[in-house]
Image (cartoon, rainbow, N blue to C red):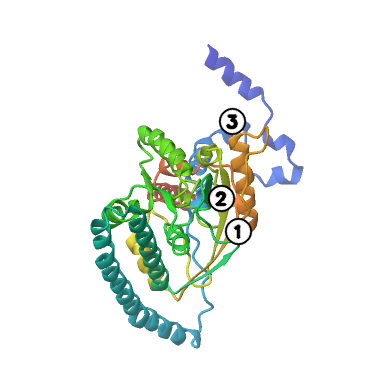
């Protein structure tokens, strides 16, 4: 009975042609009712679900450089550049990196095991060796890094926070000052370096999927900031790599330690290569290969004025104020997203396949009509 009443009420509703001009109605071969528009709601829902170019996804999307205006003059030059980058620069850079690792290991492990009773000297030598190895990494990309502001110093009650584009952020900052960084655990050769080498400078590792790790890390952070002889503490409060055009929400952990927060702004110039590491699409090894086959990695680093928690200011407000400073200095756009959502979203392949399926279904309907 309810269905009959709803059907009769639908028939009593005005049709769209009553709201159109008379000439447009005459051109329409079929009378269109409001209920006909409801039939397209599933298609609209599917279309909305297929859209992936939103303000969140753009934060983690690689932005390749604009294509050349190809012609007969530029193509030979591009081929010559490819031969130089892949045939000359890349082998030389690999040789430099390999020689650096050989020298580093031949010095690091003897110092680590032979100077057991001289902790002060051992930490000092290991700190210099880690800085040297990071400098070799930067040289293997032909890194052109310009540092602005006073160099960080070792003192208690301070923590450095920076925007995060790639793991090379740590390498670029580490070559000037041996920071103790808070970093996600990684597998493979990166994990080996974390465990055997970087722990010597006080680095702290965590696993974002383990809730117990957060409590342990929070305790270690407080203990580290109290030590006068500890290396400066470096935290990337975004918690994930962002594409150096946006900045996502800062986690408040670094801003509730009760110490000075020193902002660091990092901005990469994409004239030669995009330094963003999309960890979902590329391993860190292939990311390094891409950097080593480019002409150069160009970036600026600004060490900004230390900031303190103001009276009546919450740690979240403090984090937003520091994020504003970094965004303005590095020319980044602020978005109100939690970067950890990146790890709980569908993979890019899944969304691209869904988008392609929807496009094919629309084209098929158009062809049928």
Task: Choose top left, top right, bottom left or bottom right for residue 87.
Answer: bottom left
Camera-side mark, 1 or 3: 1
Report if the CB atoms under discs 1 and 3 are less than 8 Å apart: no
Depicted 195 relative to depicted 177: above or below: above
The percent position of residue 113, horizontal first and vertical second, equals: 23, 56
Depicted 327 relative to depicted 273: above or below: above
The percent position of residue 292, horizontal first and vertical second, equals: 38, 71
Image position of 2 (left or right of 321):
left
Q: Secondary structure at mark 1?
A: helix
Question: How busy is the neighbourhood of tag 3: few (under 14 within 10 Å), some, or many (20 plus)?
Answer: few
Residue topped by disc 2: 247
Report if the CB atoms under discs 2 and 3 are less than 8 Å apart: no
Camera-side mark, 2 or 1: 1
Q: Is residue 164 visible?
A: yes
Q: Which mark is residue 330?
A: 1
**How many angstroms separate mark 2 from mark 1 (CA)?**
10 Å
Q: Secondary structure at mark 2?
A: strand
Task: Choose top left, top right, bottom left or bottom right for residue 35.
Answer: top right
- View extreme (front): residue: 117
Q: Is residue 29 visible?
A: no
Image position of 135 (left or right of 251):
left
Is 275 or 259 nearer to us in this picture?
A: 259
Q: Secondary structure at mark 3?
A: helix
- View extreme (top): residue: 1
Q: Earlier in the sequence, mark 1 or mark 3?
A: 3
The percent position of residue 132, horizontal first and vertical second, equals: 38, 67
Q: Earlier in the sequence, mark 2 or mark 1?
A: 2
Residue topped by disc 3: 35
Q: Earlier in the sequence, mark 2 or mark 3?
A: 3
Is 300 or 18 nearer to us in this picture?
A: 300
Question: How busy is the neighbourhood of tag 1: few (under 14 within 10 Å), some, or many (20 plus)?
Answer: many
């Amino acid at each position: 009975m309810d269905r009959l009443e709803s059907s009769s009420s639908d028939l009593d509703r005005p049709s769209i042609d009553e709201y159109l001009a008379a000439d447009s109605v005459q051109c329409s071969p079929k009378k269109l009712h409001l209920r006909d528009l409801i039939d397209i709601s599933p298609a609209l829902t599917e279309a909305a679900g297929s859209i992936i170019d939103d303000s969140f996804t753009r934060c983690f999307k690689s932005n390749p450089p604009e294509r050349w205006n190809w012609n007969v003059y530029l193509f030979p030059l591009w081929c010559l550049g490819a031969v130089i980058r892949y045939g000359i620069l890349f082998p030389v850079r690999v040789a430099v990196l390999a020689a650096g690792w050989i020298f580093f290991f031949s010095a690091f492990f003897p110092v680590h095991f032979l100077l057991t009773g001289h902790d002060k000297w051992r930490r000092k030598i290991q700190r210099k060796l880690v800085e040297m190895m990071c400098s070799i990494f930067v040289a293997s990309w032909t890194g052109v890094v310009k540092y602005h502001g006073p160099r960080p110093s070792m003192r208690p009650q301070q923590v450095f926070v920076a925007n995060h584009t790639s793991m090379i952020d740590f390498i670029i900052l580490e070559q000037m000052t041996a920071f103790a960084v808070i970093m996600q655990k990684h597998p493979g050769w990166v994990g080996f370096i974390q465990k055997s080498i970087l722990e010597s400078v006080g680095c702290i590792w965590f696993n974002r999927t383990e809730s117990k790790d957060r409590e342990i890390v929070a305790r270690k952070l407080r203990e580290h900031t109290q030590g006068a002889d500890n290396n400066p503490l470096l935290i990337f409060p975004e918690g994930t790599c962002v594409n150096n055009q946006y900045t996502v929400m800062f986690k408040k952990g670094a801003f509730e330690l009760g110490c000075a927060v020193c902002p660091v702004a990092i901005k990469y110039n994409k004239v030669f290569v995009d330094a963003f590491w999309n960890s979902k699409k590329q391993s860190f090894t292939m990311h390094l290969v891409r950097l080593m086959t480019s002409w150069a990695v160009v970036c600026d680093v600004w060490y900004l004025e230390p900031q303190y928690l103001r009276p009546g200011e919450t740690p979240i407000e403090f984090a937003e104020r520091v994020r504003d400073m970094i965004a303005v200095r590095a020319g980044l756009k602020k978005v109100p997203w939690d970067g950890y959502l990146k790890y709980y979203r569908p993979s890019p392949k899944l969304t691209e396949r869904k988008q392609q399926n929807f496009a094919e279904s629309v084209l098929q309907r158009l062809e049928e009509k």
